[in-house]
């Protein structure tokens, strides 16, 4: 089966040596195409959003679970989720470009896809400006440069306006809560932490080595953040930030600075990040006002 997949892929994607389009992905690898991509498989929700923003939504022939924005993305056939990629389905779609997520896709299956010989772009923006850069590179790969350039310029302008307004405000120590059971957060290498910085916040766990580490309640209490930010619970079974209510000595609890928002606006490294950052900045500014 494996040999059949490899031979079929190599028969479909040859002649790339003299390709006219070359970009460098977020893993530092050169991605080479003979012509603008026409059939793209997106391996992460943030990738799907970026491809749409770059003008390539109609070129996406396959996507991963939770690729739900923009609304048109919900009609794209799914090829798996973070834990499992349907290799046969990917190959059946005859893609000429795969855009994968190094942190979200399994390393074993990414290696299998690489061996198929299909051009592969690793997407892993860690800073907000890198999100705009991703749009520009996708515009090159798709031949939709005009749309991508406009989207990237708008993105950068909105981020610059937020940084000018909030970047030099008095710092606010922030704990970002991804999940409650177990308690997960994000380190300084995640784009959400860059949004916290943009708003004049300080991620209390920025220095941790793991990008999405599990932390203990005691560690949060010891750091004593002035604000705790988390996603709006999806259902009634989730307590969300309510888990902190009993800890009356916690500064964020004392000041009423337990802030919820749509987590996907911050944790997805996509074109909606300025929306999430704007909400976050307003929340942290409220925390500053409550110091009085």
Image (tube, rainbow, N blue to C red):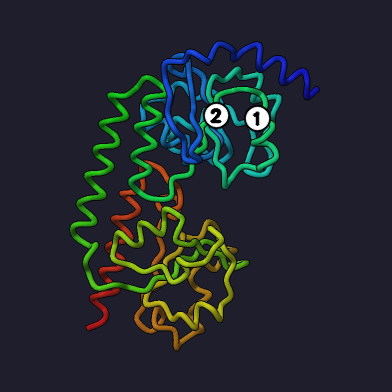
> Is 120 situated above or below 213?
above
Viewed as shown, does residue 188 lie left or right of 199?
right
Q: Is residue 219 above or below residue 55?
A: below
The residue lying at 30 percent from left, 68 percent from top is 284
Check the image and report above or below for 275 versus 37: below
- Viewer-proximal residue among 286 and 165: 165
Q: Is residue 25 visible?
A: yes
Residue at 41% x, 67% y is: 203
**Disc 1, SS:** helix
Query: How packed is label 1: few (under 14 Cα within 10 Å), some, or many (20 or more)?
Result: many
Q: Is residue 68 visible?
A: no
Badge 2 marks a residue whose secondary structure is: strand
Q: Quadrant of residue 69?
A: top left
Q: Is residue 57 left or right of residue 116?
A: left
Q: Which quadrant does the C terminus fall into?
A: bottom left
Between the C-alphas of marks 2 and 1, the distance is 8 Å
**Where does the image place residue 268, in percent across and percent down from the top left?**
45, 47
Q: Position of residue 144 (x, y in %)?
A: 34, 22
Residue position marked by numbered label 2 in the rendering = 120
Q: Is residue 235 left or right of residue 150?
A: right
* Quadrant (top left/top right/bottom left/bottom right) for the N terminus: top right
Q: Nearer the viewer, residue 227 or 142?
A: 142
- Residue 96 position in % (x across, y down): 54, 19
Mark 2 and 1 residues: CB-CB less than 8 Å, in contact? yes
> Where is mark 1, residue-wise?
113
The single residue placed furthest to the front in the displayed view is 17
Q: Residue at x 53, y 58 (%)?
A: 211
Q: 73 or 175: nearer the eye?
A: 175
Q: Which mark is residue 60?
A: none
Specify the farthest residue to the right: 1
At a point 36% along the width and 34% down the height, the residue shown is 135
């Amino acid at each position: 089966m494996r040999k059949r997949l490899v031979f079929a892929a190599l028969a479909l994607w040859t002649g790339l040596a003299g390709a006219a389009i070359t970009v460098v992905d977020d893993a530092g690898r050169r991605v080479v195409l003979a012509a603008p991509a026409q059939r793209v498989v997106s391996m992460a929700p943030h990738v799907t959003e970026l491809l749409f923003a770059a003008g390539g939504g109609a070129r996406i022939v396959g996507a991963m679970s939770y690729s739900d924005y923009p609304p048109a993305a919900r009609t794209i056939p799914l090829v798996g989720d973070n834990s499992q990629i349907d290799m046969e389905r990917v190959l059946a779609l005859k893609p000429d470009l795969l855009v994968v997520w190094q942190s979200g896709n399994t390393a074993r299956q990414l290696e299998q896809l690489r061996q198929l010989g299909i051009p592969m772009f690793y997407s892993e923006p860690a800073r907000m400006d890198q999100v705009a850069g991703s749009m520009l590179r996708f515009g090159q790969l798709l031949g939709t440069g005009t749309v991508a350039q406009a989207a990237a310029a708008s993105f950068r302008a909105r981020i610059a306006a937020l940084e000018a307004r909030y970047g030099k405000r008095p710092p606010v120590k922030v704990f970002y809560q991804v999940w409650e059971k177990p308690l997960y957060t994000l380190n300084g290498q995640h784009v959400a932490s860059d949004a916290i910085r943009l708003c004049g916040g300080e991620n209390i766990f920025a220095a941790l080595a793991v990008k999405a580490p599990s932390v203990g309640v005691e560690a949060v209490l010891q750091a004593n953040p002035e604000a705790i930010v988390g996603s709006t619970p999806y259902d009634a079974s989730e307590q969300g930030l309510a888990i902190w209510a009993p800890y009356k000595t916690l500064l964020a609890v004392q000041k009423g600075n337990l802030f919820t928002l749509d987590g996907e606006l911050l944790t997805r490294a996509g074109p909606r990040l300025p929306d999430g950052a704007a909400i976050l900045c307003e929340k942290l500014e409220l925390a500053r006002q409550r110091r009085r």
